[in-house]
Amino acid sequence: MDRLKMKTTFRNNWKIVLGSICLVVFTACDVLLPPSPSAAETLGEPIEGLTPAQQSNHIQGDGEFARSFGAADGLGPMFNAVSCEGCHIGDGKGHALTTLTRFGQMNGTAFDPMVAHGGPQLQNRSIAGYLPETLPAGATGVTRLLPPAVTGLGYLAAVDDETLFALADPDDHNGDGISGVPNYNEPPEFFQPLTMHKPLNGRYIGRFGRKAGAIDLLQQTAAAYRNDMGITSDFIMQDLYNVQTGSFTGDNVPDPEVSASVVRNVVFYLRTLKAPPRRNADAPDVQAGEQIFTRIGCAGCHTPTLTTGKSDIAALHQKQFHPYTDLLLHDMGAELDDKYTEGTAKTAEWRTTPLWGLGLSAQAQGGKATYLHDGRASTLPSAINAHGGEANLSRTRFQALSESEKQQLISFLQSL
Ligand SMILES: [Ca+2]
Ligand SMILES: [Ca+2]
Ligand SMILES: [Ca+2]
């Protein structure tokens, strides 16, 4: 039996053991144990068609993604959580309890991430004997970001910039009220561009993070180790310090706290996590909902189908997939303007959230799904009703649907 199968079997056995304990001790077991998800509903599996070497690389990265750090491993001195998995539970969407806070202030038209005051990320926890940060006075843009699911990211990473240019419509030439622009970001020193990357004035298109502030999965991962957990790596050697208290002594663990190969294994793991599986795609109300989705303009931003370009992983090379995002920024109106931003994004702009996995997010979020960048919406209609700005027209059309049409649209969204 290969290790992947063992992992699944282990999970199932564990459920059986827990189930039997529960039978002996309690009477209402079905209340305590969620029904075990069928294979078609499980996130966190590798994509099909990986070579044995790639599978083992995936498993190594899986282990690193789950690893909890302690003070002796270099955690902190300030941090937000002790493992990647601690926020990205089961590779799915995170919980309201695991949001990240970032802050800054507007200076005229320029956004200042307040680096001299510990910005842009608030590290709200610290190791023993060290003080965590607090929100500094003067932070006018404060955002709380819910961890997105990390499934299917290898596909998004392999889409050529050219494909994104074709979707962008900065001057709204087709007159649908939707523009869509890439977020251009300063690359980190360790960034290695591929031929698919088309820079503008030395900046590259961001595609990860809710504001599309990270260019590739290596940047996202190295930054997560450092900023979310206080773990230095060969890519970012500087530990976090509390500039607010003037404390520049660290965790006494020599840097780097993880090696480049650890970070690369995690990147490989993220690249090779399968896309969230569809369910009930053939049900009549789901299909009717899909047509409504297109008709009322949702697909103008939530692009149903993209194709990857060249990839060194055969399973990701020139593949069609269905993420329901254009990876571009859209002005979403005043209600979603958090006065905070990254790269060239304006404060009311957000990257179109991929809708794949939407119907599985409740499972990852402990039974109760929440939506939008900060999880403020607890139902799909309330998430849609918060769409303003470029999405105004499609929101109005949504609100004009009959109750049964709305229900069909929701059935479609839940099938993703
Ligand atoms: Ca550290
Ligand atoms: Ca900070
Ligand atoms: Ca250190």
Image (spheres, rainbow, N blue to C red):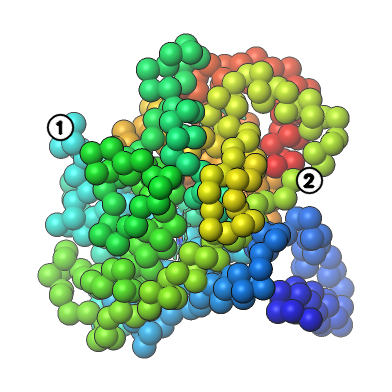
- Residue 193 lies, in percent from the top left, at 36, 52
Secondary structure type for disc 2 = loop
Of all residues, the one furthest to the top in this rendering is 175
Q: Is residue 383 above or below residue 24?
A: above
Q: Earlier in the sequence, mark 1 or mark 2?
A: 1
Residue 122 seen from this side: no
Quadrant location, the N terminus: bottom right
Structural distance between the alpha carbons of marks 1 and 2? 48 Å
Q: Residue at x 83, y 77 (%)?
A: 16
Q: Residue at x 49, y 71 (%)?
A: 265
Q: Nearer the viewer, residue 170 or 161?
A: 161
Q: Nearer the viewer, residue 414 or 295?
A: 295
Q: Is mark 1 within 8 Å of ligand 2?
A: no
Kind of residue at badge 1: Gly
Q: Residue at x 54, y 72 (%)?
A: 61
Kind of residue at badge 2: Arg
What residue sits right under mark 1 in the picture? 108
Q: Is residue 175 above or below residue 411?
A: above
Task: Please identify the quarter of the rendering in which residue 51 is found.
Answer: bottom right
Left/right placement of residue 147 relative to residue 274 reads left
Residue 18's disc is: none
Left/right placement of residue 141 relative to residue 364 reads left
Q: Is residue 386 above or below residue 396?
A: below
Q: Nearer the viewer, mark 1 or mark 2?
A: 2
What residue sits right under mark 2 in the picture? 279
- Residue 131 lies, in percent from the top left, at 25, 73
- Residue 108 lies, in percent from the top left, at 15, 32
Badge 2 local density, few (<14 within 10 Å), some, or many (20+)?
some
Q: Residue at x 29, y 52 (%)?
A: 187
Q: Nearer the viewer, residue 268 or 116?
A: 268
- Residue 275 lies, in percent from the top left, at 65, 52
